[in-house]
Structures are given as C-alpha cells and as structure tokens.
C-alpha cells in the first residue's frame, strides 16, 4: 500500500483507511431530511476522513452524481441493483491517485447470481454485491473490495447472501493469491445474528469463509448502533460492518457520529477502519 492520500505511516506500517456508509436512499418520505439537504454533509463527512476506499449503499445514480463534484479525487465502480443505472447502487469509490481498477463486477444475492435483478430466497428486494480488484499505483499490490447490502426482511436471504459473498471471495482469492481483501456493507443484522457470526468464522457448519477480522474488534469502547433513523444517539447494536481478510488486519476502527446543526447526513453513521498488512 502506497503512502498517499488515504494512507498514513506508523513506524514501518502503511495504513489503509476504508469507510462504509449507507447514505439513505433518495425518497419523498424523508421530510426534513431530504437528500438535497444532506448531500453536502455526506460529501464533507467522507472528505474529512479522506479514505482510500468508500463503499456506499442505498445510493441512486443522481446521489452519486451529486457527491462526485465534492469528491474530485475519487473514481467509482458499480451499477444499480436492477441493472444498469436502475435503482440503488452499492458503489465503491476509490482514490484515483492511489489505485487503478484491474477488474470489476457485480452479482446478485440469489440462487442465480448472474441474473440481473434476481430475487434470492425470501428477500424483499433484489440485493447485490459490487466488487473490484484494484492495483496500488506505487507498490503494485492488489486489493479486492466487496460492498454489499443484505436484505432487511429475509432471514434466510441474509445468511445465504453472506455465504454467497464468502464463496466469491474465496474463489477470487484462489485466482489471485497475492491480493488482500476487504468486505464492507450494511448487513442488516446485529453482531450476534447468524450471518455475522458466520462471517467471523463462528459457524463452520454453514460452510467455508475467508479469514476475516471484524473491525469492531479494534473499536474503543462499545459500538452502539449505526442505524439511528435521523435521531442520533448510540443505544443499540451496529448493522454496518467492515471485515479485513488476511493478510490485512484491522488497526483501528471508528464510528463517525457527527451532526450538522442537529441534522445528520444519513440515517446511518459511517464506519471507518484503518488497515495494515501483517
């Protein structure tokens, strides 16, 4: 990992900063919390951390386009969950002065993952995972990033979706054994729920999973909630996650609970993690 914007150095360690941020979709139901008001706050929140990689969820194309002028150093990959530019994205922003895209793709969390807009199991909406393989422009090291949003209704869809993402990560790791990986997203589940326990390697009966470290293991104090419904506060449990796959490890994690005059850039707090190789 190169030492550019989005990275820091601590001794001999090179630190990669990544963020996951559910932006709250563009909807007429958010009276008083409309996206037009929130967009500059969301951009300011991202820019304040200057992460190398940002995974966003619930983002329509118009939202991504409104963020882009305030994030001029970032490129992005991904498409809508109904294909092309339709519906919500799980887009991945990346620092163009640090990374180039080597390969990118998207699959649907369903029994037919290559079928556009396919519904899986008991899912209420089509769900996707956007992924990219990036090359560090300075070091040449490769980083795979996976950004997803598990279903909010279907319990089976969440565990099966997590298993599908893990299987794709394992396949890509076998194809590119020198690459590191990060999984992030809104998992719509608390740490004790089956999909999260599975991703932490605590449910081996559900099948193989990469060696993933939950960023919350390096968070100071209690995590509290990440979904707050524009009310703020900390009571509850998180549903937004970052996992680092070996050889990456989590050095530090932070939940950004900033507000703007009592208003919030989203109904979720973003989670930020600093990662190192080793």
Image: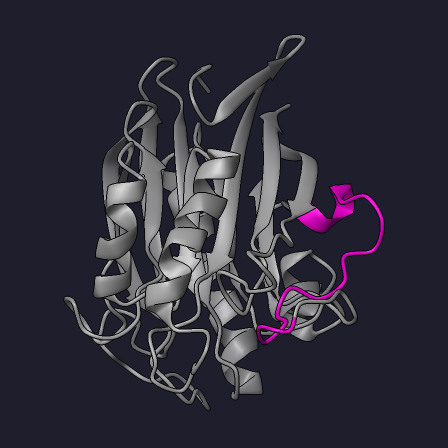
Q: Quadrant of residue 262?
A: bottom right
Indicate the position of residue 167 as horizontal and vertical percent values.
Answer: 46, 58
Q: Magenta stretch containing residue 70, yes or no?
A: no
Instruction: Identify the residue at horizontal 42%, vertical 17% (top origin).
Output: 4
- Position of residue 70 in the picture relative to residue 171 (left or right): left
Q: Position of residue 23 (x, y in %)?
A: 43, 63
The C terminus - image quarter: top right
Asked if residue 56 is positioned above or below residue 135 in the image, the reply reads below
- Please report the bounds of the magenta region as a residue range: 214-231
Furthest toward the left, the residue is: 84
**Residue at 70%, 74% in the rendered image:** 193
Report if residue 218 lies within the magenta region: yes
Name the residue nearer the viewer: 73 or 11.
Answer: 73
Is residue 112 found left or right of 85 in the rendered image?
Answer: right
| Residue 115 versus residue 262 in the image, above or below | below
Q: Quadrant of residue 102?
A: top left
At x 36%, y 58%, the residue is 39
Camera sees residue 239: yes
Q: Is most of the magenta stretch helix, strand or loop?
A: loop
Whether residue 171 can be seen here? no
Toward the viewer: 171 or 12?
12
Q: Establish if 48 lies above or below 201.
A: above
Please give the name of the residue rendered at 48% of the width and 40% of the height, measured from the top-left corner: 181
Q: Position of residue 219 (x, y in %)?
A: 76, 45
Q: Nearer the viewer, residue 50 or 33?
A: 33
């Amino acid at each position: 990992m190169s030492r550019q914007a989005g990275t820091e150095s601590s001794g001999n360690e090179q630190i990669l900063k990544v963020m996951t941020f559910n932006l709250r979709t563009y909807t007429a139901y958010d009276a008083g919390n409309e996206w037009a008001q929130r967009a500059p706050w969301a951009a300011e929140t991202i820019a304040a951390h200057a992460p190398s990689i940002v995974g966003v969820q619930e983002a329509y194309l118009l939202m991504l386009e409104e963020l882009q002028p305030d994030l001029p150093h970032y490129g992005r990959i991904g498409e809508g969950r109904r294909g092309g530019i339709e519906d919500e994205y799980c887009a991945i922003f990346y620092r163009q002065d640090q990374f180039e895209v080597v390969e990118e793709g998207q699959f649907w969390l369903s029994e037919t993952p290559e079928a556009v807009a396919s519904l899986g199991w008991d899912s209420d909406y089509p769900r996707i995972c956007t992924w990219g393989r990036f090359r560090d422009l300075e070091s040449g090291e490769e980083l795979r990033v996976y950004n997803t949003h598990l279903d909010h209704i279907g319990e089976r869809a969440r565990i099966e979706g997590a298993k599908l993402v893990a299987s794709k990560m394992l396949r890509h790791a076998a194809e590119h054994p020198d690459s590191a990986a990060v999984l992030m997203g809104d998992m719509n589940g608390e740490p004790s729920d089956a999909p999260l326990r599975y991703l932490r390697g605590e449910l081996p009966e559900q099948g193989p999973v990469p060696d993933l470290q939950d960023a919350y293991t390096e968070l100071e104090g209690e995590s509290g909630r990440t979904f707050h419904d524009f009310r703020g506060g900390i009571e509850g449990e998180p549903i937004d996650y970052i996992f680092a796959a070996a050889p990456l490890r989590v050095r530090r994690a932070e939940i950004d609970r900033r507000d703007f005059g009592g208003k919030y850039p989203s109904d979720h707090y973003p989670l930020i993690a600093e990662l190192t190789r080793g």
